[in-house]
Amino acid sequence: MNEWLDRVTMELGIDGKLSEDDAEALLKIARIAAHTSDDRRTAPLLTYLVGHSGKSPQQILEDLQRSS
């Protein structure tokens, strides 16, 4: 996605492969969480949980947009 993210994921030994579509969906999910919750800290927590859900970020974004 960008040089910083590529470098940090490599240094941490994390698979940094992230499609542009997934990146955009995750950023939109984070934005929704930050602006609709009472606590902006929910944004990184929700994106973490999305990553562990086994579902695509695009599908979760669609579900979230329907429920918001």
Image (spheres, grey):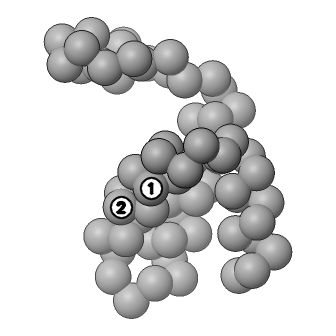
Q: Is residue 24 visible?
A: no
> Circle 1 sits in a helix, a strand or a loop, which is it?
helix
Q: Marks 1 and 2: CB-CB under 8 Å?
A: yes
Mark 1: few/some/many CA within 10 Å (<14, 14-19, 20+):
few
The correct choice, above or below, for 8 with respect to 50 in the image is: above
The three-letter amino acid code for the residue at tag 1 is Leu
For mark 1, what is the residue? Answer: 49
Q: Quadrant of residue 44?
A: bottom left
Q: Give the alpha-carbon distance from disc 1 to disc 2, as whole Å.
A: 6 Å
Give me the residue at 53% from left, 63% from top: 31
Q: Quadrant of residue 63?
A: bottom right
Left or right, 63 with reference to 35: right
> Circle 2 sits in a helix, a strand or a loop, which is it?
helix
Q: Is residue 30 visible?
A: yes
Q: Position of residue 17 (x, y in %)?
A: 50, 17
Left or right, 61 with reference to 48: right
For mark 2, what is the residue? Answer: 45
* Number of marks present in the image shown: 2
Left or right, 38 with reference to 11: right
* The C terminus - image quarter: bottom right
Q: Quadrant of residue 3?
A: top left
The one nearer the camera, 57 or 8, is 57
Give me the residue at 50% from left, 71% from top: 33
Q: Position of residue 65 (x, y in %)?
A: 75, 70
The one nearer the camera, 5 or 55, is 55
